[in-house]
Amino acid sequence: MKFLDLNAQYESIRAQIDGAVARVIRESSFILGADLQKLEAEIANYCGVHFAVGLNSGTDALAAALRALQIGPGDEVITTPFSFFATAEVIALVGAKPVFVDIEPTTYNLDSKKIEAAITKKTRALLPVHLYGQPADMDQILQVAQKYKLEVIEDAAQALGAKLHEKHVGSLGKIGCFSFFPSKNLGAYGDGGMLVTDDEAVVSYVRKWRVHGSTEKYHHEFLGVSSRLDNLQAAILLAKFPHLDTWNAKRREVAQRYTTLLSGAPKLITPTVLANSEHTFHQYTVRIEGNKRNEVKERLAAAGVPTMVYYPSPLHAQPALKHLGYANSDFPEAIRASEQVLSLPIYPEIKLPDQEKVATLLREILS
Ligand SMILES: *Cc1c(COP(=O)(O)O)cnc(C)c1O
């Protein structure tokens, strides 16, 4: 059994992918080509925003968002300590200070009730993550942002297609950032990312930023980077994009089936799905109460069931961010989550017998 089977997806759309790749190579249209423009238009339209800009990675989309809002030295950005490293890395990279607020234990997302206490005169933005594909508590986050005049950047890297009150994540704050890392719900065959927004000034900045701060060839208005989404990757993503909603719906079915198969298992907490929101189940993550998570993981692995831990260490404890001076006692829920979460195999094509094997074994181990 695989934790994620990207080949199963490829086999189901092989003709479209191979055709798109061959065409782009034949056209020699590699940088800022027509496929990228088309993908940007389609994703903007899908998210219900005016603009989308393709970048090298989700990380660069986050960095571009911070740069476009002129967030840098002297500024603070409030975010979650329980995410992929890039979320906080980009804040520190632009010279600002990542300020962590603990998570809410049922969704593992930023605890919106704790944000206000972390706001200072230096706070410029809130950067929530829609972890595992579940929308963060944006109602409350947007309310706090409005009250204190803060920008909101959504790290929607795991959540393309997720919705809150029928609105797509990424379109709720000022800027939304997506990743097309191969294992994401809409994955390229390489790195890729995209930023979406309704703000013209942001888009104008980011379109220049990704080509060395220029619009005209050999005229550079500011220092940028080299960070376009490859046209080849855009063509691959265009071939996959029409299937995204179906794939996400399948993931929700798989998740529902796990929850049914695992119901009543001792010491096990299955994911909570909030009302008014649509989860993309980028991960199906359970909590193993107590301190046996690693042992459970090893026993599953020994029986041929691969699982993953997202994430084994909260961000404040990473060596690269030690200088921020946080202690584990500052984030008890993030620490507890890092010790107890376990993500089970999930992808649209996963077979029922595999799911049953995962659930049966997990029940056996826990009883
Ligand atoms: C994947 C991911 C990123 C980074 O995306 P890349 O495309 O790999 O740079 C950022 N934040 C979160 C929450 C992610 O899952």
Image (tube, helix red, strand yellow):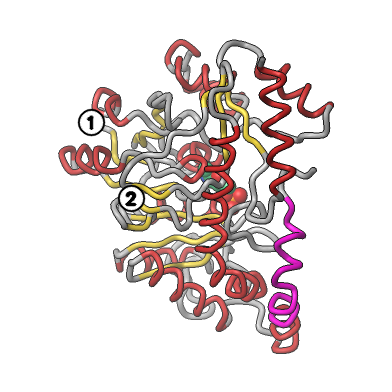
Q: Residue at x 70, y 72 (%)?
A: 13
Q: Residue at x 55, y 55 (%)?
A: 179
| Numbered-mark total | 2
Is 354 above or below relative to 317? below
From the image, which quarter does the C terminus lie in? top right
> Percent x, y for residue 239?
62, 75
Q: What is the spatial separation of the Cα atoms under label 1 and label 2, in whole angstroms?
A: 30 Å
**Type of residue at label 2?**
Leu
Which residue carries the number 2 mark? 164
Q: Residue at x 52, y 41 (%)?
A: 132
* Label 2 element class: strand
Q: Residue at x 59, y 58 (%)?
A: 180
The stretch drawn in magenta includes residue 18: yes
> Percent x, y for residue 251?
56, 51
Residues under numbered marks 1 and 2 in contact, where contact means CB atoms less than 8 Å apart: no
From the image, which quarter does the N terminus lie in? top right
> Percent x, y for residue 113?
27, 27
**Type of residue at label 1?**
Lys
Residue 249 or residue 68, whichever sits in front: 249
Residue placed furthest toward the bottom: 27
Residue labelled 2 has its Cβ within 8 Å of some atom of ligand 1: no
Give the class, few, some or many, for how many residues have Cα within 10 Å of label 2's Cα (few <14, many ≥20).
many
* Label 1 element class: loop
Q: Is 83 placed left or right of 4 in the picture?
A: left
Give the class, few, some or many, for how many residues have Cα within 10 Å of label 1's Cα (few <14, many ≥20).
few
Is 338 above or below relative to 210? above
Residue 85 or residue 305, whichever sits in front: 305
> Where is residue 11, by image quadrant?
bottom right
* Region of the chain picked out in magenta, as a range: 5-20
Which residue carries the number 1 mark? 121
Residue 356 or residue 327, whichever sits in front: 356
